[in-house]
Every structure is written in structure tokens, then in C-alpha cells.
Image (spheres, rainbow, N blue to C red):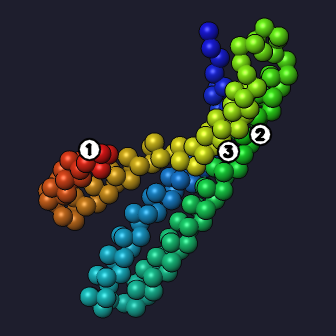
């Protein structure tokens, strides 16, 4: 019977992580808004409509890029902060458990294993925090990119996608 630390971590830091996930979602969506605004701006320069439209598109492009940068910066700050909280919680829990371990259990594990658990293994979890949202963010970005490319280029997008998929094993090798 093994206990898992992850339910306790989710209960302790889940809402903060969820806030960061919302920021990541906002950033990912804003990444795709910029090319749309740029397309509108290019169409405006070709049609010479009212000047206020060009100013509006330029202003929206500036606001989008600024907001996108702020979202990503706050996201990484929050994720590293949560990572440090997790590191403190896990290290103190491991240390507290190491102090309470019975003599029989001390014979099964060495001091080096406990120190390794407190430093290296906890650090791996901390390093994972900023990139954990890529599990849902990367497929979302790929899907949106393919959708918008399909709208612009049509079925020829499939040729590029096929080449990328075929090169995955080569890239891995």
C-alpha cells in the first residue's frame, strides 16, 4: 500500500495552479489574436478606409502584445512561486518523517537516499511546475494553428503536417 503526496499538493496549491492555468490559456489565445489583427491592419492599408480603423488596429495590436507578455510573465512567476512552496512543503515533510522513522526503517534506507529525496527529487518536481500546463497547452496551440492555417491555405496544410509527423522519429533519433 503506497500513499501519494499529489492529492495533498493539489488540495494545498491547486487553486493557485488553476489561476496560473487560466493565465496560460489567456496567453495562448492572445498569441493567435495578433496575426488576425495584423491581417486586418494589412487589409486596411490596401483599402485606405477611414483612418480611425488603422489607429484602432494598431492600438489593439499593441494592447494584445502587452497583455500577452504580462500574462506569460505572471504565469511563470506564479508557477515558480508554487514550485518553491511545494519544495518547502515536501522538504519539511521528508525531514519531519526522517526524524520520526523507527530504528528498523532506518536500516532499510541510507542517509544519502533521504538527502537525495530531499534535494534532487524535490527539485525535479519544482522544475516541472512551469511546464506542466504544456500537457494541455501544446495540443491547444497546435490545433488552433492548424485551424487557422487551414482557413488561410486550405488542404495544402496537410502536406506540412504530414512532413512534421514523419520527421518526429528522425528528430527523436
Residues at marks 3 and 2, CA–CA distance in whole angstroms: 9 Å
- Between disc 2 and disc 1, whose residue precedes? 2
Identify the residue at horizontal 53%, vertical 53% (top origin). Answer: 24
Q: Tag on residue 117?
A: none
Residue 156 left/right relative to 8: left
The residue that disc 1 covers is: 169
As displayed, is residue 25 above or below residue 87?
A: below
Give neighbour class at mark 2: few <14, some 14-19, many 20+ (Cα, 10 Å).
few
Q: Nearer the viewer, residue 111 or 35?
A: 111
Residues at marks 2 and 1, CA–CA distance in whole angstroms: 39 Å
Identify the residue at horizontal 38%, vertical 46% (top origin). Answer: 139
The residue that disc 3 covers is: 83
- Is residue 145 something one can see in this rendering? yes
The residue that disc 2 covers is: 88
Q: Nearer the viewer, residue 8 or 57?
A: 8
Name the mark nearer the viewer: 2 or 1: 1
Give neighbour class at mark 1: few <14, some 14-19, many 20+ (Cα, 10 Å).
few
Task: Return the x and y of residue 73 as percentages of the image width and height.
Answer: 61, 62
Name the mark nearer the viewer: 3 or 1: 1
Classify the position of the C terminus by image quarter: top left
- Between disc 3 and disc 1, whose residue precedes? 3
Q: Nearer the viewer, residue 5 or 75?
A: 5
Give neighbour class at mark 3: few <14, some 14-19, many 20+ (Cα, 10 Å).
many
- Between disc 3 and disc 2, whose residue precedes? 3
Where on the picture, by quarter, is residue 149?
bottom left
Where on the picture, by quarter, is residue 112?
top right
Task: Return the x and y of residue 145 as percentages of the image width and height.
Answer: 32, 57
Amino acid at each position: 500500500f503506497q500513499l501519494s503526496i499529489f492529492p495533498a499538493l493539489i488540495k494545498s496549491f491547486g487553486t493557485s495552479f488553476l489561476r496560473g492555468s487560466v493565465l496560460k490559456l489567456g496567453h495562448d489565445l492572445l498569441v493567435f489574436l495578433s496575426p488576425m489583427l495584423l491581417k486586418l491592419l494589412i487589409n486596411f492599408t490596401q483599402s485606405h478606409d477611414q483612418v480611425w480603423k488603422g489607429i484602432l488596429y494598431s492600438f489593439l495590436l499593441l494592447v494584445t502584445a502587452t497583455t500577452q507578455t504580462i500574462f506569460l510573465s505572471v504565469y511563470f512567476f506564479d508557477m515558480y512561486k508554487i514550485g518553491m512552496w511545494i519544495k518547502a512543503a515536501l522538504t519539511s515533510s521528508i525531514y519531519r518523517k526522517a526524524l520520526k522513522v523507527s530504528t528498523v526503517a532506518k536500516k532499510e534506507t541510507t542517509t544519502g537516499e533521504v538527502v537525495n529525496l530531499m534535494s534532487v527529487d524535490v527539485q525535479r518536481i519544482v522544475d516541472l511546475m512551469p511546464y506542466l500546463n504544456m500537457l494541455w497547452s501544446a495540443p491547444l496551440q497546435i490545433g488552433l494553428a492548424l485551424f487557422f492555417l487551414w482557413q488561410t491555405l486550405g488542404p495544402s496544410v496537410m502536406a506540412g503536417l504530414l512532413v512534421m509527423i514523419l520527421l518526429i522519429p528522425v528528430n527523436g533519433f
